[in-house]
Amino acid sequence: MIDKLNLSKLTKSFQIDEYTILREYLQVAFLDKFYQNRSLTNTYFKGGTALRLIFRSPRFSEDLDFTTSEVKNQISKVVGDSVYSLQKEFMGLTFNEIETIQGFSYRLKYPSEFFKQQVSIKMDFSQRESVMQPVTSPIETDLPVVPISLVKHISDKEILAEKIRAIFTREKGRDIYDLWFLLSKNTPIDKKLINSKFDYYKDRNYNKKRLEGIIENLDGEKLDQDLRKFLPISQREIIKELKRLIIQKLQQF
C-alpha cells in the first residue's frame, strides 16, 4: 500500500493530485485480481481507463468499463472475490451494486485515511454488443505495484470506434482527448468497424463531415472543465488546441 510520503512524491512525478493517484493504484490492484480469475472468458476491459493502463494515455480516468457476455451472478462473484482478496491491503474496501439503464454496474469504495471522501470507482459491465477485436495485454503502470495478470481488452481500433460513437451521442471532454490521443498514435480509422458500432443506434451512422462539425462546435469552456482534472499539469495546455488538432488529423483520413 502507498504511504502518505510516497503518495506525495508520486504527486510531483505524475503532476496530478493525490486522490487521483490513489484511485489509479486501486484500479490497477483490482484489475490484477479480477483478471487472475480464470472463470472469466468473455469480459473485456475498454474505455478511457484501458487507454491509460494498456495503451499509456496521459489521461487519468475514474471508471472501469467492460463489455461482457457472462452472466451477472458470475461477474458479481468475481468482483466479490477480488474485493475480498484486496481487503488486507485496502482495509475497509467494499463494493455495492448500483442501478443502471443497460448491463449492470458496481461501485468500489475505499475509506482512505488520507482523504475525507472515500475513493470511489464505478464499474460498468455492458452486454449490449459483442467484442469484435479481442486482445490480451499486461497492465502498464509506473506506480509501485507489479500486476501479474494479463488483461483481456478490446483493441485500440475498437476503442477508437466506440469513442467516435460516444462523441455523436454525448458531449464529454474526456472523449475528445481520447480521440486525439488515438489519432496522434496513428490508430487507423476503420469505417466498417465504426459503422458496426452505430448499428446499436438504428437512426444514426458515421459521417466524417458530421464528426468534424461536432468537434468544431464544442464549447471550449465545457471541454476544459470536464478534462482538466484528469490531465497532468504538463498536458493541460493542449486542451485549447484539441479541436484544431483533431480536425487536422481527421482531414488526413
Image (cartoon, rainbow, N blue to C red):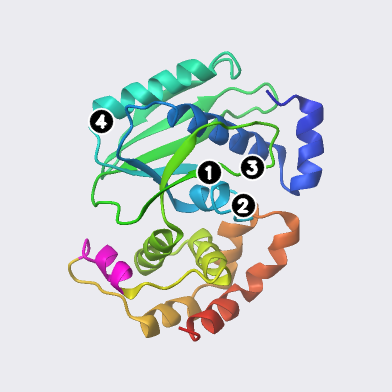
- Circles 1, 2 touching at the beta carbon (< 8 Å): yes
**Residue plotted at (33% across, 21% down):** 77
Going by the image, does 8 lie left or right of 226? right
For the residues marked 3 and 1, what is the alpha-carbon distance in whole angstroms? Answer: 16 Å
- Circles 3, 4 touching at the beta carbon (< 8 Å): no
Q: Badge 1 is on which residue? A: 62
Secondary element type, mark 3:
loop
Secondary element type, mark 4:
helix
For the residues marked 4 and 1, what is the alpha-carbon distance in whole angstroms? Answer: 22 Å
For the residues marked 1 and 2, what is the alpha-carbon distance in whole angstroms? Answer: 8 Å
The amino acid type found where label 4 is placed reads Lys
Q: Magenta stretch?
A: 192-201
The amino acid type found where label 2 is placed reads Phe
Q: Which of disc 1 and disc 3 is earlier in sequence? A: 1
For the residues marked 2 and 4, what is the alpha-carbon distance in whole angstroms? Answer: 30 Å
For the residues marked 2 and 3, what is the alpha-carbon distance in whole angstroms? Answer: 16 Å
Report crowding for label 4: few under 14, some 14 to 19, many 20 or more residues within 10 A (C-alpha): some
